[in-house]
Image (cartoon, rainbow, N blue to C red):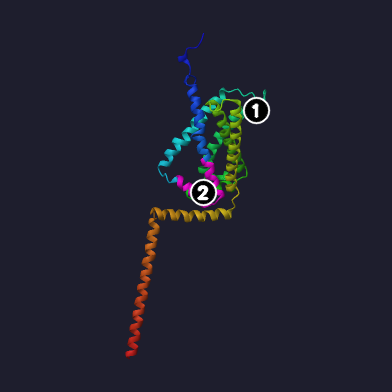
Amino acid sequence: MDTPAHTDSFLVRHEFLIRRLHSLSGLIPVGAYMCVHLLVNATILDSASTFQSQVNRIHSLGKLLPVVEWTFIFIPILFHAIVGVVIVRSGLPNSGNYPYAKNIRYTLQRVTGMIAFVFILWHVLHMHWMGGPLGGGQFNPHHAASSAGTALSQSSVLIPLAYAVGILSCVYHLANGLWTMGITWGVWTSAAAQRRANYVCIVFGLLLGAVGLSALGGFATMDEQQIEADRQIENRMEEAQRFVLGETDEADAEEAEQEEDAESEAGDDKSAAADASADETVAQLSN
């Protein structure tokens, strides 16, 4: 006897819609954000000031930034990851018995998806909270290059290696997912169209992987001298930005006012001393 439809779980009843939303979220906004994130990080190869400028542009959102991050980044990532886990648990990879290319890609897509989710979670924790021997908890948006460089270059060599594995897993998951998404949504249905799309996705993945690893190399190879030089650049940029925005520090203003008063008092003392000296000279000549 067939099970009544109303007894099916929510996921079963809405499987088609959920899988489409899962596929779409992998491209927009999660995949799009990852491309932007890696490209912004790669600007460190130009200079610390270029990278800091990009970070300042993002943080110019101010109090809206957490809202944007949760709406367009964190919640879509969580949705994509949770649904992905459900799909993985229901999937039956057969690459061991039938090692064909599509079966291997099927397995790699799921493995890299799990690695990518763990990596993203660890990346956020490492940059913002983890300290100690992991060298984390260093990132400061006002000192973006120097703080990221400290976190990645002043720690164990295993940290950059873990980042490399995570970045490549994210890139493969996106590039291969883009190809399978095109099939799922009926963008390329014929064998010839799928082959052409496959080549495009491979080139896209190779280029994005190169961008990601280059950015990682830019941070991980910093030495203390370069970190300090970048920090000085960031300090000057922060001071210039505060000046433009009119956000002067009260303590600095008071200090400047005190210095001005001291110079004024010193000038008055010198003037009084000069007048006294002149009076003394006149008195001597009169005698």
Q: Residue at x 52, y 41 (%)?
A: 37
Placement of 6 over or under 194, stated as above or below: above
Q: To which residue does mark 1 refer? A: 101
Residue 227 percent location from the top left of the image: 55, 53
Quadrant of residue 229 within the rendered picture: bottom right
**261 lies left or right of 123:** left
Q: Is residue 273 magenta?
A: no
Q: Quadrant of the C terminus?
A: bottom left
Residue furthest top in the image: 1
Residue 245 percent location from the top left of the image: 39, 53
Disc 1 residue type (three-letter): Ala
Q: Residue at x 44, y 35 (%)?
A: 71
Taking depth in this image into account, of 175 and 106 the one nearest to the observer is: 175
Q: How many marks?
A: 2
For the residues marked 2 and 1, what is the alpha-carbon distance in whole angstroms? 39 Å
- Is residue 14 at least partly visible in the picture? yes
Quadrant of residue 189 within the rendered picture: top right
Q: Earlier in the sequence, mark 2 or mark 1?
A: 2
**249 lies left or right of 95:** left
On residue 36, which mark appears? none
Disc 2 residue type (three-letter): Phe
Tag 2–tag 1 contact (CB < 8 Å): no
Residue 184 percent location from the top left of the image: 54, 26
Considering the whole magenta stretch, tell me its main secondary structure. Answer: helix
Q: To which residue does mark 2 refer? A: 51
* Span of residues in magenta: 36-58
Taking depth in this image into account, of 81 and 98 the one nearest to the observer is: 98
Residue 10 percent location from the top left of the image: 47, 20
Taking depth in this image into account, of 108 and 276 the one nearest to the observer is: 108
